[in-house]
Image (cartoon, helix red, strand yellow):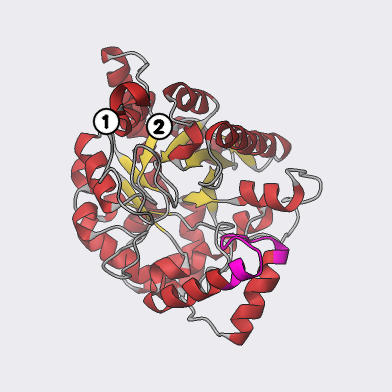
Amino acid sequence: MDLLTRARDLLAAHPVVDGHNDLPWALREQVSYDLDRLDIAADQRGRTHTDLPRLRAGGVGGQFWSVYVPADRLGGAAVTATLEQIDVVRRMTERYDADLRLALTADDMEAARADGRIASLMGAEGGHSIDCSLAVLRQFHALGVRYMTLTHNSNTPWADSATDEPAAHGLTAFGEEVVREMNRLGMLVDLSHVSPDTMRHALRIAEAPVLFSHSSSRAVCDHPRNIPDDVLALLPANGGVAMATFVPKFVLPDAIAWTREADENMRTHGFHPLDTTPEGMVVQHAFEEAHPRPVATVSTVADHLDHMREVASIDHLGIGGDFDGTAFTPAGLTDVAGYPNLVAELLARGWSDADLARLTWQNAVRVLRDAESAATVLQAKRGPSTATIGQLDG
């Protein structure tokens, strides 16, 4: 049996739970959330990285849909936009209920898989979405959000981002309270996008396992969005999971400088660097044609996973592709149909079926279940926090 066939067979039994997909934002930007105008039941190649046929072809059994809003959208506008993102995920699961099922718990994930559905979870990408309000955080959880990334590309008033100037040097007192309240709720604390100091601070005070929804190894590719080895080494004691991402500038050192130039070209043409609309991609591809980009491959991503397994152990790894949140993808991982190629590469490197089952399905389900168990214990000890940023941070 060839490796790709073995990979597909393995994924049929242990499908991928992907930690981060930005299709909801693509639906906002391209069709203003009109699901008739971008019907993911059909092949949407050329418009998105994601649709139902390609999710099925890729062996995806669980997806954390990112309910992302840009970090420059602040205050009530951020809350409103996040609610709109939550709404489209819920409408998507209702419209395509033969393929998708909203999942709020680890048991829901297992039940969806048993019924042949793709478990659909939500993660809020950036603490700015809660507008410094623990009540808003609780309401997002009530609506189904099961992780929150503490920052996006800019600092929040209470936590430092990996790609901004240090301000709090980790978490403020209110930031600590956000982590504690997330632990009490059973919402996973996502440490992708945050600074190493914030990672270490959150791990120091965490009362439940953490998540890195889409970050790779900083030792393999020295980009601030990746995870240093000393932090990876803390995951076994915490119980958390680091989900390796596919974004070329995070996995391939040669792609970092090229992407910086491509981003500046996008700004020159009036586009945000993260714009993946068809119009934005015309600009990106024109730049790529004039300035050929270094191409990451399936092997590039596997190098990260090999190193992360060595440091953190297999029980603390997962996959978070960041599809529809990046303009470019690695060769062989061009869209959500590509996961079998990665599994085949890892099989070729000697990864066992048991290790791959942990990577694709078991670790992600376990970390959510452990967060739920921690929440049960914490809710017996304390009620909802009414602290404000003004009270704690002055």
Q: Which quarter of the figure is the C terminus placed in? A: top left
In this picture, residue 10 sits left or right of residue 380: right
Query: 234 above or below 380?
Result: below
Q: Is residue 87 magenta?
A: no
The amino acid at mark 2 is Met
**Element class at badge 2:** loop
Can you identify the residue that label 1 sits on? 173
The amino acid at mark 1 is Ala
Q: Is residue 274 magenta?
A: yes
- Residue drawn where x is 22% and y is 52% of the image: 231
Residue 46 in sight in this render: no
Tell me where residue 378 sits by quadrant.
top left
First of labels 2, 1 by sequence position:
1
Q: How many marks?
A: 2
Tell me where residue 49 sits by quadrant.
bottom right
- Residue drawn where x is 39% and y is 51% of the image: 193
Relative depth, front residue between 392 and 274: 392
**Callout 1 crowding tier (Cα within 10 Å): few <14, some 14–19, many ≥20:** some
Query: Chief secondary structure of the magenta span?
Result: loop
**What residue span does the magenta drawing correspond to?**
265-279
- Residue drawn where x is 53% and y is 33% of the image: 75
Disc 2 to disc 1, C-alpha distance:
19 Å
Can you identify the residue that label 2 sits on? 187
The location of residue 97, given as percent across then percent down, is 68, 37
In this picture, residue 52 sits left or right of residue 303: right
The location of residue 211, given as percent across then percent down, is 35, 44
